[in-house]
Image (cartoon, rainbow, N blue to C red):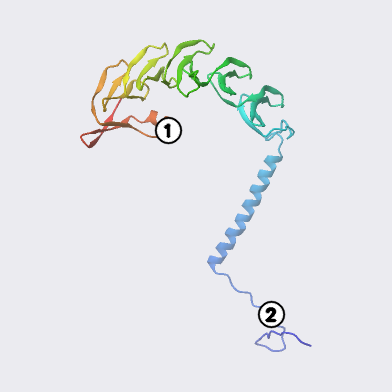
Amino acid sequence: MNGHYYPVYVKNPGKKPQSKKPKLTQFQLMVVAAAVFAVIAASSAAVYVIGKIANPEAVKIILEPSLDYDGLGVWDEGLFFALKDGKVGLIDKRGKVVAPLVYDFIYEIKEGLAAACRGEKAGFIDKNGDEAIDFVYNYVSDFSDGLALVGNYDPSGKVYRKSGYIDKNGELVIPLLYDTAHPFENNMAIVGNKEKFGVIDTTGEAVIPLVYDCVEIIGDGRLIIAEKNMKCGILDNKNEIVLPFEYDAINIYRGSREDLKKCNLLCIKKNGLWGIVLFQ
């Protein structure tokens, strides 16, 4: 009979050998205790989470997965984006179509209206999914300060374009006059023609004339950085010079827009040397 035998040595032959239990060190005892505690804690957490998930008061399925779309996402006030075959529309929480899936893009609601695109035209829909402003422009921006930037491409088909602003009734309150335009913020907007830039207010009046090579509104809109003839300066919103046009560069804090609102420091450069400006 073949086999392997492992001898057991005992002090007292004839007595049944007993295995000797090793003693645990204090550190090993601590490790074991910690492991046991972790297992108990994990088990308790799992039971708590399962209880919460199973609690119908915590999570309630309003509509079981039954909608045949390529994608679904939250839009606003109980409405959802629905995507199918490259087109997007809106549905309510019961799955009923609110806005047909005919749009290429639907953006977020801003000031009660959302910009949307359909083919080569853009307009606005309201919170009910109805078309509130006709789709007659080539491009639009979100509403801000009660106005939205709109524009059309040149009839020749070139990318050259003219921009203006409409109100929430779709009325063109500032005509399509500008080669370049930005949305309003703090009741001011940067506009440009023939590579010269300035700032207008919500009535279309020029706050800063269109004579500068570059302008940038800073802070809450009381100050404007401007550049002319390769020199930079700062103007206030009454077109008065606050910092003379004798600097080679004026750089603002480069963070998010929210961070920029909290920062009132500028970097200035003159004759190859840098300095810092604090503005109020």
Which badge, 1 or 2, comes first in the chain's sequence? 2
Name the residue beneath numbered marker 1. 256
Image position of 269 with respect to 236: above or below? below
Crowd tier of the residue under label 1, counting other residues whose Cα lies within 10 Å: few below 14, some 14–19, many 20 or above: few
Image position of 131 with respect to 257: above or below? above
Q: Residue furthest bottom?
A: 13
**Most foreground residue, 244 or 103:** 103
Crowd tier of the residue under label 2, counting other residues whose Cα lies within 10 Å: few below 14, some 14–19, many 20 or above: few
Q: CA distance from mark 1 to mark 2?
A: 73 Å
**Most foreground residue, 57 or 206:** 206
Image position, residue 220 (x, y; %): 37, 22
Mark seen at residue 186:
none
Name the residue beneath numbered marker 2. 18
Secondary element type, mark 1: loop
Image position of 5 with respect to 85: above or below? below
Q: Let me know if residue 78 appears in the view.
A: no
Q: Quadrant of the C terminus?
A: top left
The amino acid marked with disc number 1 is Ser
